[in-house]
Image (cartoon, rainbow, N blue to C red):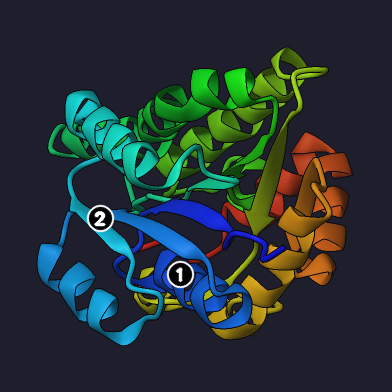
Amino acid sequence: MVNSPLKVFITGASSGIGEALARQYAQNSGAQLGLVARREDFLVRLKAELAPSPEIYACDVRDIAALKAAAQDFMKKFGVPDIVIANAGVSCGTLTEIEDDLNAFQEIFDINVMGMVNTFHAFAQPMRDAGHGTLVGIASVAGFRGIPGGGAYSASKAACIKYCESLRVEMRSSGVSVVTICPGYIRTPMTAVNKFKMPFLIDVKQAVVRFQHAIDAKTSFTVIPWTMGVAARVLRMTPNWLYDRVFSRMPRKPR
């Protein structure tokens, strides 16, 4: 009996971690992919380079109707996915006192948090009904503590971590697993704009191999690379007076 290919649905798939995950699952697992991103031209290029040919959906994760339509189309063609990876995310420097940054705060929360909720909403009930599957939320170590100049991003990723934790408990005994992955500094277009030294920086191709291992093992929560996880846990335990003194002098993410 021939096993059917793994079915994987990924948002934010046009570049960075999402694109690398698509390539990893296609090349390493021969997975049937459903890929979502706003940039259709990037998706078309990626589709031409992967086998088996993925289904591509040019839509915004903030658009719940479009995202549900993409999910329903994928499931109609291939069935309920084995893995859904909510990866879509944006980042930029923000300052609360600058009025123009309020829109950036809203966009970051809408894409990073509600985009994840919308993605999982589209598949949660079908996965429950099927009694299997893995929902993967890509969060960040930035959600462990507030990063000065990156309040919107840090807060959004902290929300993602807690949301996935809540969902994991809700899905307990349903057969559906929830995996939270917190990347540290990964070499992608998103981190390329950073003008400061990024500790434990790793290449995205290395990172997604580790992502897949964590997903395959249904690891409930992991930081990649593990060295960044150790550093993040130390920061969590650092007294506020010391954390504030040190990080108030750190370079800020560009606005």
Q: Quadrant of the N terminus?
A: bottom right
Locate residue 47 relative to residue 220 in the image: left or right: left
Mark 2 and mark 1: Cα distance apart in space: 12 Å
Q: Secondary structure at mark 1?
A: helix
* Quadrant assignment, res 37: bottom left
Residue marked by disc 1: 22
- Position of residue 64 measured from the top left corner of the image (x, y, whole percent): 24, 25
Residue occupying the point 80% across, 19% down: 172
What numbered label is drawn on residue 124?
A: none
Residue marked by disc 2: 37
- Relative height, residue 205 to residue 241 (above, below): below
- Position of residue 47 measured from the top left corner of the image (x, y, whole percent): 26, 75
Residue occupying the point 31% across, 86% down: 49
Locate residue 137 relative to residue 74 in the image: left or right: right
Q: Is residue 111 visible?
A: yes
* Quadrant assignment, res 246: bottom right
Locate residue 200 relative to residue 147 in the image: left or right: right
- Relative height, residue 196 to residue 93 (above, below): below
Residue type at mark 2: give it. Answer: Ala
Number of other residues with Cα within 10 Å of mark 2, as a class: few under 14, some 14 to 19, many 20 or more: many
Q: Secondary structure at mark 2?
A: strand
- Position of residue 6 measured from the top left corner of the image (x, y, whole percent): 59, 59
State if disc 1 and disc 2 touch (CB < 8 Å): no
Residue that sits furthest to the top in the current view? 170
